[in-house]
Image: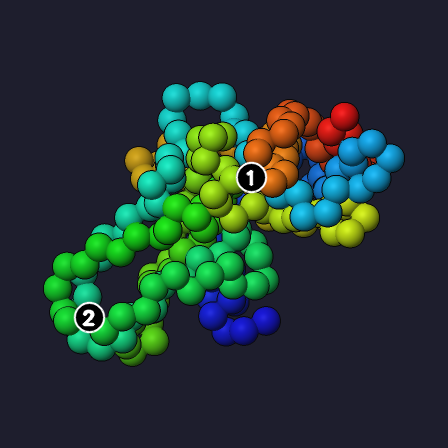
Amino acid sequence: MSNKTLLISIIVAAFMMTSCLNDSQPPFYSLVQGVVTVGNGPVQGAGIHVENFYTPDDVFSPQNVDEGFEISFISSSSGEYNANLYRFRSDSLLANFYTAELDSGEHVITIPAELLSDGIYVYEVVTPSNDSFTRLLFAEKSDSLLYRSEPFTTTNADGEFLINPNMLAFGADFLTADNSEFVVIDSIEFKIVVDSVLVETRKVEVRPNQDSFFEFDLD
């Protein structure tokens, strides 16, 4: 793991509070697996979008990202600035979406809408001195625009897909800016996009301590 990825993991952890569990062992979530088929065959390249659900309350709403997401910051020095986007708890970079020479002062940059779908992201802005600030983004996109955005994953030649459950933040506690708490629960909604068309939507529960496999037959 690179130093930058490690730094992001540390910063993200600072946003989270440890849940109080009655059991001595926290719940374990296995890989979320599935297959998309039509007729008797697999569907290759289907876009798998995943919408997280949170404990129902009035303290938090995800950010609408239909037109992208603006980041405002004040630069203290001139030079090259870079901005990167990651999926929550992902080990790999999703995109370096901004690189530019900036003077000191106030700036606004935008995460492009095509990079953002439903789910939890981490973005960072890296300064010329290689310092960075990192934030969480809880994103929500209109179903009609999902085909224009980066899916969580896509199906392989056998129509299958795998999702790391850690990237879905099941059971994690988060704080809002005003110190209100919300919890990511273990229910998600799959949205399947094939050839730029949303063909199926299904809400499911991913149960802890057991395998999770979901079949999507598009007939």
Q: Residue at x 63, y 29 (%)?
A: 199
Residue 31 in view, yes or no: no
Asked where in the image residue 77 lies, by quadrant, the reply is bottom left
Direction from residue 165 to residue 212 in the image, left or right: right
Residue at disc 2, secondary structure: strand
Q: Which mark is residue 196?
A: 1
Name the residue at the left extreme.
105
Against 11, residue 206 (above or below) is: above
In depth, the one of 12 and 44 nearer the eye is 44
> Split into 4 quadrants, where in the image is the N terminus?
bottom right
Name the amino acid type tagged 2.
Answer: Leu
Direction from residue 76 to residue 152 in the image, left or right: right
Direction from residue 194 to residue 71 in the image, left or right: left
Name the residue at the top extreme.
57
- Neighbor class of circle 1 (other Cα within 10 Å; few <14, some 14-19, many 20+) is some
Against 16, residue 53 (above or below) is: above
In depth, the one of 107 and 183 nearer the eye is 107
Against 193, residue 44 (above or below) is: below
Direction from residue 94 to residue 65 in the image, left or right: left
In the image, residue 97 lies at what x, y percent?
39, 61
Q: How many marks?
A: 2
Asked where in the image residue 171 lies, by quadrant, the reply is top right
- Neighbor class of circle 2 (other Cα within 10 Å; few <14, some 14-19, many 20+) is some
Name the amino acid type tagged 1.
Answer: Ser
Q: In the rendered image, which residue does mark 2 sit on? A: 102
Residue at disc 1, secondary structure: loop
Q: How is the image coloured?
A: rainbow
Q: Residue at x 87, y 35 (%)?
A: 40
Residue 208 in view, yes or no: yes
Q: Residue at x 44, y 21 (%)?
A: 57
